[in-house]
Image (cartoon, rainbow, N blue to C red):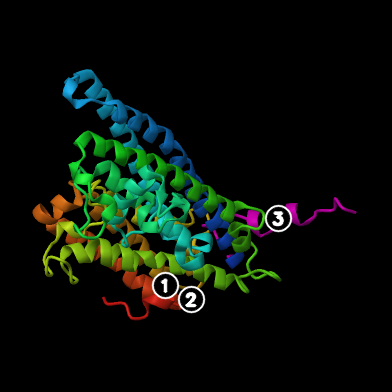
Amino acid sequence: GDNSGGGDNSGGGDNSGGGDNGGAPAFSESDLLVSLVDNVMTPAFVEFDSKTKNQPSLAQAYCDLESSYDPSMGDASKSAELNEAKVAIQNAWKETMVSWQHAELMIVGPLLASDKSLRNQIYSWPNVSTCSVDQDVMFFANGNINGNAYDISNRSDKRRGLDAMEYLLFNENMAHSCSSNVASILADWNTKSEQERKTLRCKYVVEVSKDLSDSATALLFDWQGSDGYAAKFKNAGQPGNPYPTTLKAINEISDALFYMTEELKDYKLATPLGLFDNKCGNIACAEEVESIYAKHSIENIRANIAAFEQIFIGGSTENTGFDDFLDNNNASDTKEIMLKGLTDAKTAAGEVSTDLQTALNNDAAKVTQTHAKVKDVTDQLKNDFINKLALELPKTSAGDND
């Protein structure tokens, strides 16, 4: 009958001996997808959501103090209290940013849809505009734009997200960043007192933090909901699934790994180093770094490398990852080169001991070394990794300028 040694207790593939003594379970593409969803991507998105949820109350607490602060009183304890509250929301932003920089390697499903619109709402870098943020500080304060009620959820991504928050929380310059003739909304900005301007900016920070939390909620719903992308990835290849084969679903995840080639290697490292054209004329250029106001660029880079490694090994070595897929396809040599490359890249980024702007000026060799080690990984990614797993290159990366 039904208890005569059914499939799950008859010594099937998954319990007939440990992984390293010849009885390893057979690799399956479906297992890889389940592992990457459950062990890497879902935890990353859940963590990001929880970090965003901490921010609005901290932003509000800081802004309440900023709004009531009178610098002319010379009250040292009030000043210290205000500073402490500001540092608390700045630190919350840093934690949220590290969490997001892991997710940047996972731009799949809901983050990829509609030209990455949800991703860009959360973080639009390298397409950022501080002048747009400056304008929305005043549009929000006025409560309307051209007679329509202000609604941040209808605003363009450069006015929102982690990049807008960074500028508002960390930029110490209270002048607006628009060229004079652009923005009539800012016509009288520079006549306001410094304290008024700080207060207007912090009020918009509160609004941006709430919008960011809403974006994270939307991401989790689109990922974990009953018809969400997590289920679509796990059931790839089944009838009616948007991914006609498991390999097509895996290819969307491998496409996301190419963030390491373009955004990380080229934009975050090669461009500031002057290996590519930059605004300083092909020399080291501190103003080209990613998190220029928060001086958080090297932390972002470390998070990107760590996230690539997480996806590569499936979260941890005992889980199914791309490392196992390579072993299965007789490409253990490629696996070993990539694992060593990731270790070396983590070490190199860890040896940059100052913020990236300072390092570019004082210790550029360590930044150059980080770039070289990241490139060791991406050279494998775009050649042997793709070829040996029978994957396709991302559409954008065919003409990569290495």
Disc number lying in front (3 or 1): 1
Pick the quarter of the image with the C terminus: bottom left
Contact, mark 1 vs mark 2 (Cβ under 8 Å): yes
Check residue 391 in the rendering and tell me which mark sits there, or answer none.
Answer: 2
Instruction: State which tag comes first along the sequence, 1 or 2.
Output: 1
Instruction: State which tag comes first along the sequence, 2 or 3.
Output: 3
Q: Residue furthest right?
A: 1
- x, y percent for residue 287: 17, 57
- Image quarter of residue 76: top left
Real-space Cα separation, disc 1 to disc 2, in angstroms: 8 Å
Is 18 colored magenta in this rendering?
yes
Amino acid carrying label 1: it is Phe
- Image quarter of residue 209: top left
Instruction: State which tag comes first along the sequence, 3 or 1.
Output: 3
* Residue nearest the observer in this picture, 150 or 331: 150
* Residue nearest the observer in this picture, 34 or 186: 186
Real-space Cα separation, disc 3 to disc 1, in angstroms: 33 Å
Is 367 colored magenta in this rendering?
no
Q: Where is mark 3, residue-wise?
A: 11
User: Does residue 346 appear anywhere in the picture?
Assistant: no
Q: Secondary structure at mark 3?
A: loop
Q: Residue at x 39, y 70 (%)?
A: 334
**Side of 164 relative to 148 (left or right):** left
Amino acid carrying label 2: it is Leu
Q: Is residue 368 above or below residue 302?
A: below
**Side of 260 relative to 30 (left or right):** left
Q: Residue at x 51, y 65 (%)?
A: 113
Pick the quarter of the image with the N terminus: bottom right
Which span of residues is magenta-colored? 1-27
